[in-house]
Structures are given as structure tokens and as C-alpha cells.
Image: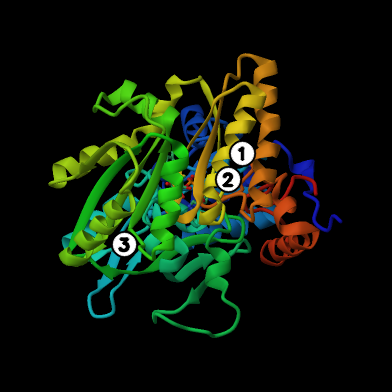
Amino acid sequence: MAIYCLSRDRINSMLNKEAIRRLKEIYSPGDISDQPEDLMAYGFDATGEDGTIDLVVFPTTPEQVSQTLEIANIHDFPVTARGAGTGFVGASIPLFGGVQLVMTRMNKLLHIDHDNLTALVEPGLVLGRFQEEVERLGFFYPPDPASLNSCTLGGNVAMGSGGPRAVKYGVTRDYVLGLEIVLPTGEIMNVGAETVKSVVGYDLTRLLVGSEGTLGIVTKIRLRLLPLPESTRTILIVFKTAREAVYIASQIIKNRIIPSTLEFMDHNCIMAVEKLLRTGLPIDAGALLLIETDGSTEAANNEINEIKRLCEGYELSQVRVAKDEKERAMLWEIRRSLSQAIKSISPTKINEDITVPRSKIPELIDRLSALSDRIGQPIVNFGHAGDGNIHVNIMTDKSIPARYETAKEAINDVFSICLSLGGTLSGEHGIGISKSNYIESEIGELGVLITKKIKRLFDPNNILNPGKITPLGG
Ligand SMILES: Cc1cc2nc3c(=O)[nH]c(=O)nc-3n(C[C@H](O)[C@H](O)[C@H](O)COP(=O)(O)OP(=O)(O)OC[C@H]3O[C@@H](n4cnc5c(N)ncnc54)[C@H](O)[C@@H]3O)c2cc1C
């Protein structure tokens, strides 16, 4: 039931001379470019795919963003926002040319409110820099995607990103109190409040978080902060079998221990990381859990002891407790090097971030293993066992078409296994272009219809990041 078809006479549009002239009036020469190297450098993301761009602009004020969108409406060209381009689903890849709005020069930490534990930031600020800054002042901002040293807070908001600490602390959405947004029609609007609670009208803030740059451009973000926990303890437990590891992960939650992180890596991950880092992981092991607890020193220690107690009776291949910050960093290096390490298994990975109810992880792992046997290609699993978010990587080879086609078809199986277990197609990476053809299988025809109506309400001329979230031409 299509209500919103893209008017694709605009495909591969070139900006007309008048539009370019007007854009040049808004931006200083160093903040606008049509140089081939810039058009190439800002048109791709971590999927490795790229798009077509006619012009790149680097706004430094909300007014510049607003004027750009006004011109886009008059001259009918698409505009796509980009943070650091670390997205995994092609959400920042421009499909139809037009202007790429690179937000990285709006990167200030504007204010920290010590009395109310909030921060006001610009969207281009890199997450890791923000975290360092607030931690120096004794505050804590938990959302921690593994890309934290490059991804931007604006990208995090647009994608609703999360990370290992989501199990205890939630995701970006849980920390956004309010936003300054430039609507696709150019108006500047504020949503949300400075207060920690507010129920005035529809919750537009929550709608905009995770909208993948399709409903508005984020130009300011008000974030909730927490006090920095007194103490953090880190333990790595290596199991003989994957089944035992995921069973213990579900037992930890069932026993009402909520660690700050509860990460899972399967046998293939252990082999790949050991090959890369040589940290002494047993390569015949079935899986490992990397767990962190935090809070008061006593509480963090008690939870680690409780987790050890749950493992009693299992023949463990290795247990490492970090004694200091250096050892903790080393244990995290095992987890953080994974994306790079698993490339040694096969040249191409198809990475999905499905999420199932935590108690269903053992069944998920068994069914993925059967799928891997059936397609004759490795499926490597790791991720945030604590919140059921498992990164399923079908390891394949793009240069062998038959193999690659089989791997791509297996995505359907991965998604149907996930949905049959009561899961969701994406826990944190979003939909973008990679999963837009699958969205209906989860939210239904009516869900897609409402999504398209919301998009049209915000963006009547479909100029902002067209072709994302819902299927093209649908
Ligand atoms: C190695 C690696 C590890 C990762 N680990 C995780 C992880 O653990 N958890 C996780 O959730 N993700 C992870 N990601 C994915 C990615 O880092 C996140 O989606 C991140 O939030 C994207 O931020 P970005 O600044 O790179 O945004 P981009 O990729 O540039 O853009 C993403 C989307 O945000 C929109 N956008 C950007 N800025 C704005 C703005 N100011 N206003 C409106 N829309 C905007 C874009 O249009 C696009 O739709 C990982 C990626 C990599 C490469």
C-alpha cells in the first residue's frame, strides 16, 4: 500500500547554478566544496558502499543548516547529514546526489550543568572526547558504541546507538532530554525539556532519536549525565562450550545481577583474536564472556564473586580478573579488536545486529550453528549477551558470486530465526538502506504506512535523506 513514492526524476540530480550560487553566499569558501576528493571522502560509511554527491558543506551554525534546507526545498535537491560515517547500514550514504551536510565542525561541548547533571553539546562532538571531558569532572555518560573514538553524538542520536553498557545503563535514547532540530522545511524547532521528566504532548524527542537523519537535522543535544561510579571490576571467563557460556549469561540475569557489561564471543572470534593479538586465549575454547560490574567497591566485588559462584561446577578454560586499569584495557582490547580480527576468517562479512530476549540466546546460537552447517560458510557470533543483542557475521567472499549469493540469502533465515524467537531485526545499528526491505516483516504493513506518513508530515518534498528506513519506491 504505497502512499509515498519517491519522485525519482531527481535521481542523480545535479544542483542547478542558482542553487549553488545561493549556497556559496551562505558558506565561507573553506566550508563548501565540489572537489572530487571531498565528494568521494564524504559519500561512504562503514558498509564500504558509497553514494553520489554534488556538493559538500560543513555548517558551523544552525542558521546555515536552516538556509541550506530552505534552498533545497526551493530547488528540489536532496540533503543528507553525515557525522563520522561510521554507520553500519548506509544511513548516511546519499542515494540521489545533492548536498552532503557534514556536521563535524559543529563540535563544541557548550555547557555542563553541574547542579542538574546535564550537558548541552553540538552534534559533531566525538563521543569519546565528550566522555573523557565529563569523566574528568566526575560525571558519567554511559552509551558506548565500539566506534566511540570516531563516531559523533549527532550520529549516535540519529541512530539511537548503544554499546556494551546498555545492559545496565540503556542506550543513547535514554539520555537525550531535548534537541534543537532543523526541520526539512528549514524551521528551527526545540523538542524535549531541560528537566529529567516532561510529558507535554507527543514525545517528539523519542521519535527523532533513531530517525536516521530523515526527519530533521540535529543541531544541539541536551544529555542527561550520571555520577561516575566509584569502582569497576572486570572479569574474563573462557568456557569449553558456547552453550555453557550463553547459559551462564542468562543465569546471571535470571539471578538478578545486572553487570554493566556482559559481552559474548564465540569460538571463531577467540581464534581470530588470538591470531591477531596473541594474548594467551585457549584456541580450543567454545566461547568467552567479558563481564564488568560497577558501583560502590563493595557492590562491584560482590557481583563478581556471585558470578564466579554461578560458574562453579563448570570446567572453565580460563578466568582472568583485571587487577588494574592496564589489565582492564588489555581485556577490552580482546573485545574491541574483533571487527578487525574476524576479517582473517573470510574477506567479506555480512554483519547483522539482531536482538532476542536474553533467555533465548542459547536457542539462537544453536540455530545459527545449524544454519552455518547448512550453507557451508562460517557464521561468527559475538555481542552484547546481557541485552540479547548478538552480532551475527556471515563470513563469505564477495569475489565468489555463488558463495556470496548463498550468504546473502541466509540473511532471510537469520531474520526469520530472530523474529520467531520474539526478537528484533536491529538492536543498535539501525535500518538505513541495508535493512529497509526487511522492516515490514517486523513492524507490519500498517507500521510501514504510518512510518511513511510521519516522514511526509515532516518532509513534504522528500528532500532529507530520501530512500532510507522504508523500502525504495514503496
Ligand atoms: C568499528 C565500529 C564499531 C561500531 N560499534 C557500534 C556499537 O557498538 N553500537 C552501535 O550502536 N553502533 C556501532 N557502530 C555503528 C556506528 O558507529 C553508529 O551508528 C554511530 O552512532 C554513527 O555515528 P556517526 O557519527 O558515524 O554517524 P554517520 O554514520 O555519519 O551517520 C549515521 C546517521 O546519522 C545521521 N546523522 C548524522 N549526524 C546527524 C545530525 N546532526 N542530525 C541528523 N542526522 C544525523 C546520518 O544522516 C545517518 O543517517 C559501529 C561502527 C563501527 C565502524
- Pinpoint residue 429: horizontal percent, then vertical percent: 52, 47
Q: Quadrant of the N terminus?
A: bottom right
CB atoms at circles 1 and 3 under 8 Å apart? Answer: no
- Pinpoint residue 288: horizontal percent, then vertical percent: 36, 39
The relative height of residue 262 versus residue 208 in the rendered view (above or below) is: above
- Residue 103 visible in the displayed image: no
The dot on residue 141 is 3
SS type, badge 3: loop
The dot on residue 277 is none
Residue holding disc 2: 363
Residue holding disc 1: 367
Give how far apart the Cα atoms at labels 1 and 3 are: 36 Å
248 or 104, nearer to the observer: 248
Residue type at mark 2 is Glu
Give how far apart the Cα atoms at labels 2 and 1 are: 6 Å
Give how far apart the Cα atoms at labels 2 and 3 are: 33 Å
Report crowding for label 3: few under 14, some 14 to 19, many 20 or more residues within 10 A (C-alpha).
many
